[in-house]
Image (cartoon, coloured by chain):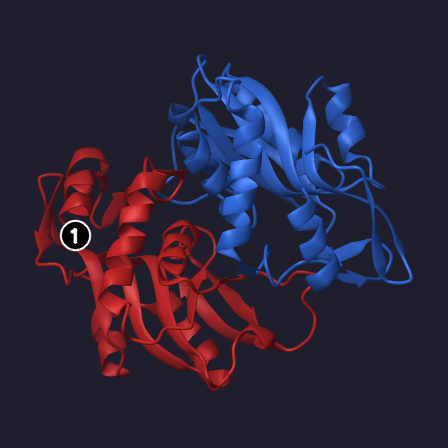
Chain colours: A red, B blue
């Protein structure tokens, strides 16, 4: 997605070996115009796939996932990272290790929001090691629902998340693919859309 | 907001003494159509107020805040509840106690996204004790920016958050105000919009 790649080059900050900070438009401050374009781009790709739900994980996935859901005209569900006292029955869970935050979280979705007739498009802001997406897949399969694909805004192609998810049998569709960082600049691989 | 009150009556679940669960359209599964209406309703109210930023707190505030930002055509910023290794300088923080989750979190916003010329509309999904909103106000004032108002989707009017924020001098504008629960049913107070 050319618009996204241009925005990453303009406003992204490369930190250290493997961190790209995009907090001015995606992960902290959010540019709704770009999110709408992202939503439309995924929706164009999946408009004939029969997707019935968009699933993401709090918190940075919510903004892009919401506009994908709007463009596909389906509900969006965001998985929770911590138990809440108002969430107490019929909860589907998976363990997810975050390399960025260096903690393991129990990720959960209330089972009542997924059923075997659902075809789910997973959306997330970043794909690095694939642990978050893998946790979401486990939860969706516990519900007997089908994962159509994993849509990623920014893929760190130098990490092994894509390989892991493809080995599990799920297509990954990424709008921007980071091949490597050179002198503090992003070098892209060809994106999927 | 009549549409919201009707939705609460239809799909909200009263749990125990003081919990209203709205996880089928707001706090877990998200109905983007309702969020758009919420965004437009707040925007109609604040369209002449010169708002330059919408600020919320992860995670359930993001969906309504995003559509408010879209309708006002300004950026949305979501405050973070935990430190992230990619967030390491110029961070403004406040301590916030969550009665729902029974934990104190450090809430933070990168200072670079707020400046003294900003006029901020705070948006949150729930107002109970007002601790989250108070933390956001503290952060916004550390940046020298101005808080225009606090826009709330669902106010628990039987708790003291509104009083606390009004005493601090900030207007609270709530789309639905829960007066009390009677036999497992919500009884509303007159809403602000």
| Relative depth, front residue between B179 and B129 | B179
Q: Is residue A171 visible?
A: yes
Q: Is residue B181 above or below residue B58?
A: below
Q: Which residue in the structure is indicated by mark 1?
A: A1
Q: Residues within 10 Å of mark 1 (few under 14, many from 20)?
A: some
Tell me where residue B41 sits by quadrant.
top right
Chain of the residue under label 1 = A
Q: From the top left corner, tell me how far across and down residue B163 is, in percent.
A: 80, 28
Give left or right: position of B30 versus B90: right
Tell me where residue B84 sits by quadrant.
top left
Q: From the top left corner, tell me how far across and down residue B93 is, in percent.
A: 54, 30
Q: Is residue A11 above or below residue B98?
A: above
Callout count: 1
Give left or right: position of A137 versus A116: left
| Relative depth, front residue between A181 and A47 | A47
Residue with the most extreme right position: B183
**Residue visible at 50% across and 46% down?**
B36
Q: Is residue A31 above or below residue A192?
A: above
| Relative depth, front residue between A49 and A9 | A49
**Residue visible at 72% across and 32% down?**
B192
Residue with the most extreme front position: B2
Q: From the top left corner, tell me how far across and down residue A80 is, in percent.
A: 54, 62
Q: Is residue A129 visible?
A: no
Quadrant in the picture for the C terminus of chain A:
bottom left
**Residue visible at 20% across and 39% down?**
A7
**Label 1 element class:** loop
Q: From the top left corner, tell me how far across and down residue A110 is, in percent.
A: 59, 72
**Residue visible at 66% across and 29% down?**
B134
């Amino acid at each position: 997605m050319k618009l996204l790649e241009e925005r990453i080059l303009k406003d992204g900050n490369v930190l250290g070996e493997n961190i790209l900070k995009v907090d001015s438009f995606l992960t902290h401050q959010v540019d709704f115009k770009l999110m709408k374009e992202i939503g439309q781009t995924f929706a164009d790709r999946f408009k004939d796939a029969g997707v019935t739900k968009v699933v993401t994980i709090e918190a940075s996935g919510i903004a892009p996932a919401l506009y994908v859901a709007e463009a596909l005209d389906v509900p969006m569900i965001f998985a929770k990272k911590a138990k809440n006292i108002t969430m107490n029955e019929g909860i589907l869970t998976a363990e997810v290790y975050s390399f960025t935050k260096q903690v393991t979280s129990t990720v959960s979705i209330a089972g009542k929001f997924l059923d075997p007739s659902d075809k789910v498009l997973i959306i997330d802001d970043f794909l690095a090691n694939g642990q978050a997406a893998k946790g979401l897949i486990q939860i969706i399969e516990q519900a007997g629902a089908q994962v159509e694909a994993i849509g990623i805004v920014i893929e760190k192609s130098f990490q092994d998340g894509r390989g892991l998810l493809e080995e599990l049998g799920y297509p990954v569709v990424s709008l921007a693919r980071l091949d490597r960082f050179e002198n503090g600049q992003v070098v892209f691989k060809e994106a999927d859309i």
